[in-house]
Amino acid sequence: MLRLLYIFFQFIILLIIASWSIQNSKPVSFIFKDITVTTSTSVLIIGLLVVVVICLLLQRFVFFLKQSKQKYKFYRERSIIKKGHNSFVQGMVALANKDFNRVIAEAKNANKYLKDKSLSLLLTSETLKIEKKFDQLNLVYEEMLNEPNMNLLGLRGLMEQNLRAQDYHHAFIYGEKLFYLNPKIEKLYETLINIIGKTNNWQKMIYLSEQSLKYKIIDKKTYIENKSIAYFEIAKIKHKSFEQESIELMEKALKLKEDFAPFVSFYIQLLINNNKLNKAKKVLKKAWTAFSHPHLKQHMEELAKALKISYLELVKYIVANTKDNYETQILLAESYLDNQSWDNARLQIKSLLSHKPTREVCLLMSKIEEGYSGDSHKINAWISRSNLGKLSKVWVCHISGISQAKWTSVSKSGYFNSLEWKYPINISSLEGSGFEINSIDYIDN
């Protein structure tokens, strides 16, 4: 409506100008190549208006042609994009329905119709996964890195591809870049930690754990666990060349995870190596008082020799505050056994024989009987009875269920920090764990 009013007012103005020029017309003469031309101002003005109107009409016509061409191009492109989007949607529906032939066909159509490669790359990547064309899939993921809104998906895809190929070095490179861009991607931190467990890049674990705590991706407990393990593993690497630095790292680890037996055990070994014997003795007593773990027995004999005292004397010092503890009674019995004090060993273990003695106690009694009487019938009777006794706690991977004799940051099954100190299901679950289940070595780790 406004446009019509605008044209109407323009027409009125032209009429007014034409009317005014006619009413006020005056003769005009000019010479052109010896020819005198006589006319009036009204004719000149009206002629000029006609030229202007014609020019405007031509301009409108040209503009109309251009606009028509642009509209045609726009609607054509929109139609093509619509076909591409439709192919993408149909492809995703086919993927959900596991109609893989349709997925492949729609992926080709999406590539054909869409100039923006984001959607077509996404559908193509899913298609190549189905076809198991992993080399081509890598190329698609690399192409995604050049698309601003697809680079995260490209990095994740390349990380997963390298994990599939067990190329943990490159998997971590892509995963770390992904972490820097968006650390809150679901399970990204856990994936990177598991990769670190396979590549021993423990310094990165400290950094990633600090950043993840900062962004509230992990809780304080997980942060402490993982950082302490990183210090422990770095200390193990450095102790061959930089033992003092290794000791300092272990002190950091124990500050985070106090009295953890595997850490204490390694720390004791470092202190013995550096002739810090009294400190080793105090640390061992403190750890045994906090948690009487069989792991802590590992270096007691070595420490006793270094201190030039008997094994029994060292044990009595260590267990002074935990005499009624089950592990303490076992340790004292073993130390008496080592000292060939058969009666004391028997007396020490007597309270553990009253009701359903454990497998550990029965095997220990067989050793005591062997030294005390040498009676093969009694020895074999205790060994046989051990088959009915409760098994001792071991390190068990809570993911795979596989047991092992010693704690490691990565279990034999390949899982990071998955070991728990608990009772095994049965004897068969101990096979291949590193325990000698028919001897006292089974008890001593």
Image: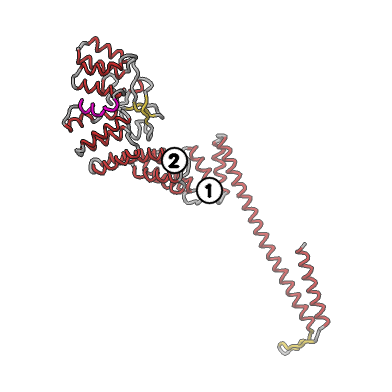
**Marks 2 and 1 close (CB-CB < 8 Å):** no
Residue 5, percent from left and from top: 78, 66
Question: Which part of the image, by quadrant, shows the N terminus?
Answer: bottom right
User: Compared with residue 260, is residue 173 higher up or lower down, i.e. above or below?
Assistant: below
Q: Position of residue 21 (x, y in %)?
A: 80, 80
Q: Residue at x 83, y 82 (%)?
A: 23
Viewer-side label of 2, 1: 2
User: What's the residue at 33%, 39% (across, down)?
Assistant: 255
Vertical placement of 112 versus 270: above or below? below
Crowding at dot 1, Cα within 10 Å, few <14 / some 14-19 / many 20+, comes out as some
The image's colouring method is: secondary structure
Q: Residue under label 2, please give it.
A: 218
- Answer above or below: position of 255 versus 45: above
Give whichever of 302, 333 is nearer the camera.
333
Residue 81, given in percent of the width and then of the height, sits at 60, 49
- For the record, the magenta segment spans 312-322
Report whether 304 appears left or right of 295: left
| Quadrant of the rendered image containing residue 37 | bottom right
Callout 2 secondary element: loop
Q: Which residue is mark 1?
A: 118
Tally of numbered tags: 2
The location of residue 380, given as percent across then percent down, is 26, 12
Amino acid type at image mark 1: Ser
Q: Main secondary structure of the magenta part?
A: helix
